[in-house]
């Protein structure tokens, strides 16, 4: 993967709202085929960064290239082609509440204006099947779905155009541990089946461990470190220390349990 080309290149990013500086000389490269997680404290600028990569916001200074094209100086056709190669799973699922499951997934396909309804139908049903949504749920409204189903339908919609690049904003937020684990397994399956590059923002350490190849830590208005979990977990930055404290404790508990099992004592 080290040899893979960069699919996103962010250089010298500066973001400011009034007097409030959010990013200062932020640099980050994301490689084709990897899952890169962005972590950082509340207000560190993760969502703004995601929105800038998606072209929904523009920084004061700096450049963002995606598929080798500058995000902010591209014409409409290029912008549209980048959009079609990109899928986004928003934090709350963000399904259109007035549209059925079927119509939510069909929306990006209809927006292409090149496919007939029969083809759209087949593609929607394939995507719903991929995320394990039974056909009988296709005509339900989002309000009648469970939290886990909303996430899966949102993933089907994000994958509707067979994107190369998938953005996940807090993919497991709001799911209980069991649903969260099954959603993570679904993303792992999609990743290997579809050859995706994934950029994910998450606070959830289990999701981070299960999915990410590299982790970029946002703090002090910059990416303070980027690397594998093993590479970054012993970094001495205060945010990283507190972030991984709970994970270390969990590993220690597991180690203790293993030791006790070997020596015949179980911890209370
Ligand atoms: N449109 C805006 N106008 C003014 N300030 C903004 C705007 N958008 C974001 N901010 C500020 O920029 C900072 C970074 O916001 P952002 O939402 O990216 O943080 P975050 O890292 O995603 O936080 P959280 O983990 O809490 O969601 C915050 O202080 C926020 O208030």
Image (spheres, rainbow, N blue to C red):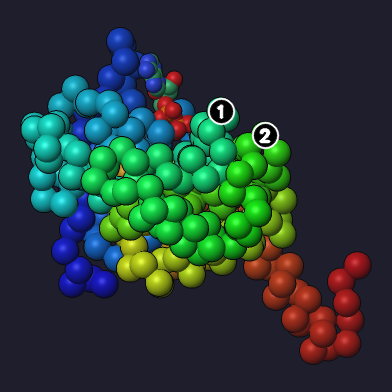
Residue in front for this viewpoint, 98 or 246: 98
Quadrant position of residue 181: bottom right
- Determine whether the residue tagged by mark 1 lies in a helix, strand or loop: loop
Q: Quickly name the residue at label 1.
A: 98
The answer to whether 193 appears left or right of 244 in the picture is left
Residue in front for this viewpoint, 63 or 235: 63
Q: Quickly name the residue at label 2.
A: 143
What residue is at 53 percent from the left and 63 percent from the top? Answer: 129
Among numbered discs 1 and 2, the one appearing first in the sequence: 1
Q: Quadrant of the N terminus?
A: bottom left
What residue is at 38 percent from the left and 60 percent from the top? Answer: 35
What residue is at 18 percent from the left and 72 percent from the top? Answer: 3
The answer to whether 260 appears left or right of 23 in the picture is right
Badge 1 residue CB within 8 Å of ligand 1: no
Is residue 218 in view from this perspective? no
Specify few, some or many for label 2: CA neighbours under 10 Å numbering under 14, 14-19, or 20 or more.
Answer: few
Residue in front for this viewpoint, 9 or 139: 139
Looking at the rendered image, the disc whose residue lies closer to the viewer, 1 or 2, is 1
User: Please, is residue 257 above or below residue 6 in the view?
Assistant: below
Badge 2 residue CB within 8 Å of ligand 1: no
User: Please, is residue 14 above or below residue 249 in the view?
Assistant: above
Residue 167, position as x, y percentages in the image: 38, 48
- Determine whether the residue tagged by mark 2 lies in a helix, strand or loop: helix
Is residue 163 in view from this perspective? yes
Disc tally is 2
Specify few, some or many for label 1: CA neighbours under 10 Å numbering under 14, 14-19, or 20 or more.
Answer: few
Quadrant position of residue 206: bottom right
User: Please, is residue 258 above or below residue 252 in the view?
Assistant: below
């Amino acid at each position: 993967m080290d040899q893979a080309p960069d699919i996103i290149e962010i250089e010298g990013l500066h973001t400011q709202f009034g007097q409030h500086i959010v990013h200062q000389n932020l640099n980050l490269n994301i490689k084709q085929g990897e899952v890169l997680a962005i972590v950082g404290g509340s207000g560190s600028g993760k969502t703004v960064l995601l929105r800038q990569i998606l072209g929904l916001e523009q920084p004061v200074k700096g450049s963002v290239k995606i598929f080798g094209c500058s995000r902010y100086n591209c014409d409409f056709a290029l912008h549209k082609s980048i959009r079609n190669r990109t899928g986004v799973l928003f934090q709350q699922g963000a399904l259109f509440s007035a549209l059925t499951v079927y119509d939510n997934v069909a929306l990006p396909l209809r927006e292409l204006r090149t496919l007939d309804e029969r083809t759209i139908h087949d593609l929607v049903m394939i995507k719903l099947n991929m995320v394990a949504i039974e056909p009988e749920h296709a005509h339900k409204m989002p309000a009648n779905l469970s939290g886990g189903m909303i996430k899966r339908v949102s993933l089907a919609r994000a994958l509707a155009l067979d994107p190369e690049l998938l953005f996940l904003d807090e993919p497991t937020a709001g799911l209980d541990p069991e649903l969260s684990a099954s959603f993570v397994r679904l993303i792992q399956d999609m990743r290997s089946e579809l050859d995706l590059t994934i950029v994910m923002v998450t606070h959830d350490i289990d999701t981070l461990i299960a999915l990410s190849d590299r982790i970029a830590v946002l703090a002090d208005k910059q990416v303070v470190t980027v690397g594998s979990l093993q590479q970054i977990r012993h970094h001495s930055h205060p945010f990283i220390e507190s972030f991984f404290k709970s994970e270390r404790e969990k590993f220690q508990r597991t180690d203790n349990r293993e030791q006790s099992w070997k020596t015949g004592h179980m911890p209370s």
